[in-house]
Amino acid sequence: MVRFTLDTKGAPFDLSHTLESGQVFRWEKSFAETEGGRRPVWLGVLPEGVVRVSPGRNGILTCSSSSRRIGAVYLRGYFRLDDDLPRFYSSAANEPGLREAIRRFYGLHLIRQNIWECMLSFVVATNANIPRIRLMLSRLSDRFGEETKFEERTYRLFPSPGALAAASVEDLARCGLGYRASFVRSVALSVTLGSIDLDELVSLDYTSARDRLVERSRGGPKTLPGIGRKVADCVLLFSCGKDTAFPIDVWMARVLRRAYPYLLGEEIVARLDSKTKNNKVALSPQVYDRIAAIMREYFGRYAGYAQQYLYHNERMGRP
DNA sequence: AACCAGGTGAGGA
DNA sequence: TCCTCACATGGT
């Protein structure tokens, strides 16, 4: 067991907003009674082990972890505490759509998470809601992840590519994955066989990395089935540091339609208004790319951050 | 009890 | 190239 503290003074950081904003799915919140009142305690299962984090007075986080590999330096990188949020905030100070979101979720950070876990998480996330995503990932981990101990309790780490590649589609489906089970297996296989090099994505520019994730090889089968533009953008933003990535899901489509119709133009607004039989927004790859390009140009360097604030604000409902 | 969910790939026009 | 639709399953 390793105890340490993490000083977040000098930079806006809100642990709960960050962990509740739909980027990561293997953190659980509880509460502890202290002399100062009730405070949140977050327990996270990371690739290197288990960690407990609780925000205290003066922006000091009290932490303990199961591994020496998870310490203050690690979490500083994971929570991206060195990001210049004040600069993002001042660049958005007069932006009508963002102002409210920044006020409500002041201190929300993008997280830099493990690429493999992030990729699997958002493959599984397609056409599902967040509670269910958490359930699927927790079942996958319980069934295929390595055991680890922390404070007398056992946890299961996120399963490795090899562990999932070795599983049968039926066994994967038993984790409640539905039709995503075959995607999960194929993606795990591609990573295991080296058809895609995840670490390389970090060094590529955004467009090349996106293409690497999405494209099929010469009309052949996709190397990464289940990974389209939206999933690729999530992976690039939440795990590869591509801060101009701008994932567009149904919530983003809604807020963009409402708050930025003048940027999108009539044609795209009409697309966003049209629904399929299933009452879903019809976002073809081309329209997705056009919207993302417009918003990227509008928000610039902080497009990814803008997306995350707008997304979370929309999901939390407007007061 | 419908309707929805951090979408995608297959198949047809 | 474009559009439409099925898809499993748990949440709300």
Image (cartoon, coloured by chain):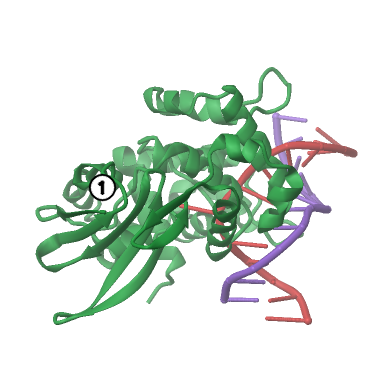
Chain colours: A green, B red, C purple
In the image shown, does A202 or A4 lie closer to the viewer? A4
Q: Which residue is mark 1?
A: A75
Q: Is residue A99 above or below residue A118?
A: below
Q: Quadrant of the N terminus of chain A?
A: bottom left
Relative image position of residue C1 (x, y in whole percent): 70, 29
In x, y percent, where is residue A230? 54, 43
Left or right of A157, for residue A162: right
Residue A228 visible to the viewer: no
Left or right: where does residue A208 sit relative to residue A308?
Answer: right
Q: In the rendered view of the protein, which quadrant contains the C terminus of chain A?
A: bottom left
Name the element at disc 1. Answer: helix
Residue at the image position 37 percent from the left and 48 percent from the top: A49
Q: Is residue A9 left or right of residue A263?
A: left
Give coordinates of residue A103: x percent, y percent. Answer: 25, 65
Which residue is at 74% across, 44% downward? A169
> Mark 1: which amino acid?
Leu
